[in-house]
C-alpha cells in the first residue's frame, strides 16, 4: 500500500525550540510517496511528536498504527507499547475522543487540518496539556479505512502564545490578518461565520472579495492612505457575504510592524453592526414619515416638556396662530392663551391626566382670537414620572361660528321639526332629553312635558341596551368617536306600555362651548322582519361573551414569567398554549434567595374570568410568601387556608404542585395538592420518575396534610411540569394523548434545551390531534439541571 502525505519541517532564523513552553514553531509543505516501511522510518527520525492513526469504516474509535520516538518518549512509552492500541487510551478526560471526532469531521480535503486542545495521560499516569493537530492521509483503501496524522505539541503553564490563540479563536469579534500586500493570512472562526466563507476559501485572497460594491473607491483609498500614514484606521464598512447578502461592520485596522519598524501585516477586528444599522435606518425613515405627515396635516401637532414648554411644533402652527415653528419652540403654552383660559388650562396640565376635545382660546399673532379643539396625552415612564406631553390642536374657529349661526336659526327651523314625519329627540351629554317633537309623542306615547328632563335610555331604550348606550356616550365624550353617529342605523326602541319595536336611527353630535348636544331622528320600521331583531340580539350577546374571554386571556397572559432563566447550574422555561375557552392554568418560577429557586404550576377549575381571577389571587399569595423561609408543604398549607373560603363559596378548586430547588446542593423539595405529577427523567438510566406526594387539592377541606419529599438531581436531569390539558387532549378518534406519549417524547428530546423540548411536545401533540387549538389550556414547563 502506498501513502501520499504532505510534510515539511523547517526552522527560520527567528524560530527555535522553546524549552520553557515546550512548543515548536513548525510549517510543512512537501510531498512524498513511498511504502509504509519507508514512511515509518522517516517518521521515527522526526524530532517532533507524531502518531499515525487508522479508523476502520463502521468504527468511530481510531487505532494507533505508528508512533515515532519523540511522541513515545513524551508519553513515557516505547513505540511497541502503543501499536494497535485505541487512541482513547491516551486521553486523560472522557471527552477527548469526541473532540478528535469533531476535528476529523471538519476536514474536507487532504490538505486541510484542524486543531484542538486536550489532556493526554502518560504511562506514569501524569496529565499533559497539549495542542493536537489532525490531518488526513489519502489512501488507496479509503473504502475500507481512513488514515490520519496526529501532531502533538505539549503546552507548558504560562504559555502566552497558546493563551493568545484561545483569545483569538474564541473571540466574539471577527478577526483577519493580511500581509502587507493585502493577501489574507489568517481568519478566526467568527470571521468565517460572519462572511460565510471557510478559512480555506479566504486564505491567500484579497479582502476585495468581500466588497459589496456599494462603497466608493475613494472611500477605500482614503482608508488605505490613513492606514499607511498613521498605522491605524477605524470606521464602518458595508461588505457582502458568500451568499450575496450585504452586512455592516465596524472595523478597526492596525498595522503590525517588525523590530525595524517596517509594516509586515495588518490586523482587522470587525464587529457586526448590521442590526444596529437597520434599526437606525428604520428610525430615520419613521422620523421622516412623521415629519412629512405633521407638515401635511392641517392640525397642529406639538410636544411639551413636563413644565409645559414646547419641545416640538408642526408647521401647521403658522397657519393656525401665525407663529413659525422656531417662534413656538421654548415658549410656555400659557403664553399663547387668552387671559380667560390661562387659569383654567393650567389645572389640566397640573393634573397629569389626559384631556380630550378641550376648547382653547388662543391669541393669534395678529391679535385675533382663535378657537381650537385640543387633545393631550401625558407620556409616563416606567417609574410613573411624567416625561412629556404630546397632543394636537384642531382649528375650530369657523366651525364654532357656524354652530352659533345654527343656534340662532333654531327658531326658524322649529316649525319644520314639529311637522316632521320622524320623531326628533334632542339629548345633552348627560343622556337627558332636552327636546321632544310631536311625532315623538305619537310614536312613544310620552307627552313633551313628560319626556323632557328624563333619561333617554330609561324612557325609550330597552333596559338590556342601557349599558351599551351609556358606554357609547362615555366613549364618544372621551375620544370624539362613536359607532352610530352621523349615520343611519337600525335600533330597538320601547313604547310607554313596554312593547318593543324596531326603528331606524340617525344621531348627530353638536358641540356648544365645551359640551355636546345630540339630535336624533327616529323612524318606525316595525314592518321589518322579526328575525333581524333576533340576529342583532345574538350579536350583542356574542360580543359581550368575547369581551369577557378576552379579558380573562389578558389576565392569564400577564401571570406567566416573561423569559426563561438560564445559569451554569440549570435552565428553566415555560409556555402556555391558550385553549378555545379560557381556563385557569398558571405557572411561575422565581428566586426566593440567591441559592433557592421556587417553581409552581397550578390549574384552577372552570373557564373564563372566575378562574383567571383566582389565578391572580393564587399568584399574589405565593409571591407574598417570597420573603419567608417556607417549605413547599408549608406554602401549600398557607395557600389552602388563605383561599379556602373564596374557593368554597364559588365552587372552584385548585390543583397545584410546588417545588423548591437548592442550587448549591442540587436538591429538590416538593409537595403536591392534587396536581398531575411532574416527570423526572434521568438521562443515565433513561427512566421517567413521577414526582408524587400525598396532598388534597386546594379548596376541598380547611385542614389538609401535605406530604413533602426531597431528591438529589444529577447532571442532565430533566423535569417536565404540565397541566391535565396535555395528557387529556383528544384526537379525532376520541383517544387521549396520554402520559406514555409524553414520556416517549421527553426521552427522545432529553439532550435538547428546555425550549426545544417544549416545542417537540407541542409538535407531537398537534400531529396527534391534527389541529393547533384544543378545548383546554395546555401549560408546559421544563427544568434542566446542568
Image: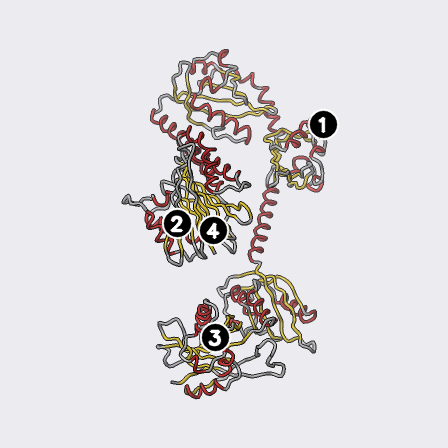
617 w.r.t. 144: above or below: above
Q: Which is nearer the N-term, disc 1 or disc 4?
A: 1
Spatial CA distance of label 3 from label 1 is: 88 Å
What residue sits right under mark 3 in the picture?
134
Q: Nearer the viewer, mark 1 or mark 4?
A: 4
Q: Residue at x 45, y 51 (%)?
A: 783
**Relative to the observer, which residue lies in front, 210 or 609?**
609
What residue sits right under mark 2 in the picture?
679
Q: Nearer the viewer, mark 2 or mark 4?
A: 4
What is the quadrant of residue 478 in the picture?
top right
Spatial CA distance of label 2 from label 3 is: 43 Å
What residue sits right under mark 1 in the picture?
339
What residue sits right under mark 4 in the picture?
667
Provide residue 584's location: percent of width, then percent of height: 42, 38
Q: Which is nearer the N-term, disc 1 or disc 2?
A: 1
Instruction: Label 4, secondary structure: give it.
Output: strand
Q: Is residue 556 left or right of residue 223?
A: left
Q: Nearer the viewer, mark 2 or mark 3?
A: 2
Q: Is residue 38 visible?
A: yes
Amino acid at each position: 500500500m502506498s501513502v501520499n502525505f504532505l510534510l515539511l519541517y523547517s526552522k527560520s532564523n527567528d524560530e527555535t525550540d522553546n524549552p520553557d513552553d515546550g512548543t515548536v514553531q513548525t510549517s510543512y509543505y512537501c510531498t512524498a510517496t513511498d511504502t509504509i516501511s519507508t514512511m515509518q522510518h522517516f517518521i521515527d527520525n522526526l524530532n517532533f511528536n507524531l502518531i499515525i492513526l487508522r479508523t476502520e469504516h463502521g468504527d468511530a474509535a481510531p487505532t494507533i498504527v505508528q508512533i515515532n520516538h519523540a511522541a513515545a518518549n513524551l508519553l513515557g512509552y516505547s513505540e511497541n507499547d502503543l501499536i494497535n492500541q485505541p487512541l482513547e487510551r491516551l486521553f486523560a478526560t472522557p471527552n477527548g475522543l469526541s473532540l478528535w471526532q469533531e476535528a476529523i469531521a471538519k476536514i474536507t480535503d487532504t490538505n486541510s487540518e484542524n486543531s484542538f486542545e486536550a489532556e493526554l495521560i502518560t504511562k506514569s499516569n501524569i496529565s499533559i496539556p497539549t495542542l493536537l493537530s489532525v490531518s488526513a492521509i489519502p489512501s488507496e483503501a479509503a473504502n475500507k479505512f481512513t488514515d490520519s496524522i496526529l501532531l502533538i505539541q505539549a503546552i507548558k503553564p504560562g504559555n502566552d502564545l497558546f493563551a493568545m490563540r484561545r483569545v483569538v479563536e474564541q473571540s466574539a469579534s471577527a478577526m483577519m490578518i493580511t500581509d502587507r500586500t493585502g493577501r489574507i493570512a489568517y481568519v478566526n472562526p467568527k470571521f468565517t461565520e460572519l462572511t460565510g466563507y471557510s478559512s480555506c476559501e479566504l486564505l491567500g485572497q484579497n479582502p476585495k472579495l468581500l466588497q459589496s460594491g456599494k462603497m466608493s473607491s475613494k472611500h477605500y483609498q482614503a482608508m488605505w492612505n490613513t492606514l499607511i500614514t498613521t498605522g491605524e484606521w477605524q470606521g464602518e464598512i458595508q461588505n457582502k457575504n458568500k451568499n450575496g447578502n450585504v452586512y455592516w461592520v465596524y472595523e478597526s485596522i492596525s498595522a503590525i510592524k517588525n523590530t525595524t519598524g517596517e509594516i509586515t501585516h495588518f490586523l482587522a477586528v470587525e464587529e457586526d453592526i448590521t442590526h444596529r444599522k437597520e434599526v437606525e435606518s428604520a428610525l430615520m425613515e419613521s422620523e421622516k414619515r412623521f415629519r412629512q405627515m405633521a407638515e401635511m396635516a392641517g392640525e397642529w401637532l406639538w410636544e411639551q416638556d413636563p413644565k409645559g414648554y414646547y419641545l416640538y411644533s408642526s408647521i401647521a402652527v403658522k397657519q393656525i396662530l401665525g407663529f413659525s415653528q422656531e417662534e413656538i419652540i421654548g415658549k410656555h403654552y400659557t403664553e399663547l392663551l387668552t387671559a380667560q383660559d390661562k387659569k383654567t388650562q393650567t389645572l389640566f396640565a397640573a393634573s397629569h391626566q389626559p384631556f380630550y376635545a378641550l376648547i382653547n382660546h388662543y391669541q393669534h399673532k395678529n391679535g385675533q382670537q382663535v378657537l381650537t379643539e385640543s387633545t393631550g396625552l401625558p407620556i409616563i415612564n416606567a417609574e410613573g414620572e411624567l416625561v412629556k406631553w404630546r397632543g394636537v390642536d384642531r382649528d375650530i374657529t369657523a366651525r364654532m361660528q357656524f354652530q352659533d349661526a345654527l343656534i340662532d336659526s333654531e327658531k326658524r327651523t322649529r316649525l319644520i321639526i314639529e311637522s316632521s314625519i320622524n320623531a326628533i329627540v334632542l339629548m345633552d351629554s348627560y343622556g337627558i332629553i332636552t327636546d321632544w317633537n310631536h311625532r315623538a309623542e305619537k310614536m312613544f306615547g310620552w307627552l313633551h312635558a313628560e319626556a323632557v328632563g328624563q333619561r333617554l335610555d330609561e324612557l325609550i331604550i330597552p333596559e338590556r341596551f342601557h349599558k351599551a348606550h351609556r358606554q357609547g356616550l362615555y366613549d364618544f365624550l372621551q375620544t370624539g368617536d362613536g359607532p352610530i353617529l352621523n349615520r343611519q342605523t337600525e335600533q330597538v326602541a320601547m313604547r310607554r306600555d313596554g312593547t318593543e319595536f324596531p326603528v331606524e336611527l340617525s344621531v348627530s353630535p353638536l358641540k356648544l362651548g365645551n359640551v355636546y348636544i345630540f339630535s336624533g331622528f327616529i323612524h318606525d320600521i316595525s314592518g321589518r322582519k322579526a328575525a333581524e331583531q333576533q340576529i342583532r340580539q345574538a350579536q350583542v350577546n356574542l360580543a359581550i361573551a368575547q369581551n369577557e374571554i378576552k379579558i380573562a386571556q389578558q389576565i392569564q397572559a400577564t401571570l406567566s414569567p416573561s423569559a426563561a432563566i438560564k445559569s451554569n447550574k440549570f435552565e428553566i422555561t415555560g409556555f402556555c398554549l391558550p385553549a378555545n375557552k379560557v381556563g385557569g392554568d398558571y405557572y411561575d418560577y422565581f428566586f426566593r434567595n440567591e441559592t433557592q429557586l421556587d417553581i409552581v404550576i397550578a390549574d384552577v377549575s372552570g373557564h373564563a374570568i372566575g378562574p383567571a381571577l383566582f389565578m391572580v389571587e393564587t399568584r399574589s399569595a405565593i409571591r407574598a410568601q417570597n420573603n419567608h423561609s417556607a417549605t413547599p408543604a408549608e406554602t401549600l398549607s398557607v395557600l389552602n387556608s388563605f383561599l379556602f373560603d373564596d374557593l368554597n363559596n364559588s365552587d372552584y378548586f385548585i390543583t397545584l404542585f410546588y417545588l423548591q430547588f437548592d442550587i448549591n446542593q442540587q436538591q429538590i423539595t416538593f409537595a403536591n395538592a392534587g396536581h398531575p405529577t411532574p416527570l423526572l427523567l434521568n438521562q443515565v438510566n433513561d427512566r421517567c420518575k413521577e414526582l408524587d406526594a400525598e396532598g388534597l387539592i386546594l379548596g376541598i377541606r380547611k385542614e389538609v396534610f401535605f406530604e413533602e419529599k426531597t431528591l438529589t438531581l444529577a447532571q442532565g436531569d430533566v423535569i417536565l411540569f404540565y397541566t391535565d390539558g396535555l395528557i387529556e387532549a383528544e384526537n379525532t378518534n376520541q383517544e387521549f394523548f396520554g402520559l406514555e406519549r409524553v414520556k416517549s417524547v421527553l426521552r427522545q428530546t432529553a439532550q435538547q434545551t428546555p425550549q426545544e423540548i417544549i416545542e417537540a411536545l407541542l409538535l407531537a401533540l398537534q400531529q396527534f390531534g391534527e389541529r393547533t387549538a384544543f378545548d383546554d389550556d395546555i401549560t408546559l414547563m421544563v427544568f434542566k439541571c446542568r
